[in-house]
Amino acid sequence: MTELNLSGDSFSATSVEKPKRKPSRKLRVPLVILVSLLFPGMGQLYALRIWRGVVFAFISASLSAICVERHALLTFATALAYVLLALLWYLFVIVDAGRLAWVYNPLLAPPRDEKKTIAGVVLIFFLVGYPTPDYLTKKQHKFFRAFKIDSGSMCPTICQGERIVAASDAYETQSPSRGDLILFDFNHTGQIFTKRVIGIAGDSIARGPGNTILVNGATLTLPKPCGQHEAFNPLAPEGPPFETVKIPEGSLFVIGDSLDNSYDSRFFGFVTIDEIRAKPKFIYWAHNRSRFGCELH
């Protein structure tokens, strides 16, 4: 019988370690892209580009802050420019993060500096995570709102199914002028109506000959609409009857531009200033492309 040598000079199975496997790119790259979508800059952090990630997060937050502070979404041109710029920037951030994740090799990379990594995560989180975006969103809602129009009473200026952007703070420091478009909460019921102001405090509104309305004795003329629209048929020979009224303080007389198809002050009386919610600014979507970006007057 041959005796086995179990001394320290013999081969030991436990002394050999299996080589570490490089993490699969198929898992690493999609994960980094997903994280970058949620938190721009965090993907760069994965590849140990800490300051690069922080700078990217700062630029992303700055774009949102500038948009909010400059009210960029209240005109079609600036809104379109901001959306395109933001899309290009976020695409660049995501592509850069994906590229870094593709070439990054954890087996060859230097050890992570835990303190710098944690500091980077905290900075990025506060720049593009809660609470900064939440604060900007709440601030944006104070001046920017988007609405879908469910009625044809304002056609051809704004037709049924079209979507508009409105300024929520337009009348915080001033009252509407004659001719302004407004969104108001009808009798504080939560129903949002879109109408045109034709009479302010002190004005006299009366029924004119045929299907016309007199404002301080002059025939009301509506502005020409923008683009191709789905206007209703020509007006009827006679409009609905209503009494001649003088507008009191704090009240408005409103009508729909489609005079024969509008439930307005001729029927329900005055709108009070405290019912006003916003001022329509432009159409951002319509069935007819010629209406895209139409400014509302």
Image: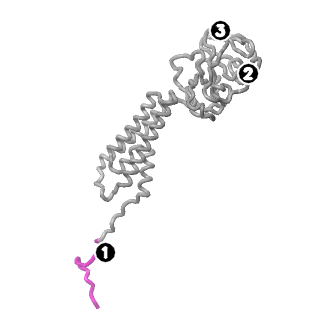
Q: Residue 104's spot in the image, x, y percent?
A: 35, 54
The residue that mark 2 highlights is: 235
Query: Up-down: is 46 above or below 201?
Result: below
Kind of residue indicated by mark 2: Leu
Query: Up-down: is 264 above or below 291?
Result: above
Point out the frontmost of discs 3 and 1: 3
Task: Locate the N terminus by quadrant.
Answer: bottom left
Q: Nearer the viewer, residue 111 or 150?
A: 150
What residue appears at the point 28 percent right and 54 percent down from the top-left corner? 110
Query: In the image, which residues are magenta?
Result: 1-15
Kind of residue indicated by mark 1: Ala
**Residue 123 located left or right of residue 178:** left
Res. 39 image quadrant: top left
| Callout 3 touching callout 2 (CB < 8 Å) | no
Q: Secondary structure at mark 2?
A: loop
Most prominent secondary structure in the magenta stretch?
loop
Residue 86 appears in the picture as rendered: yes
Point out the frontmost of discs 2 and 1: 2
Q: Secondary structure at mark 3?
A: loop
Between the residue at mark 2 and the residue at mark 1, the CA separation in whole angstroms equals 97 Å
The residue that mark 3 highlights is: 216
Which numbered marker is on residue 13?
Answer: 1
Residue 188 appears in the picture as rendered: no
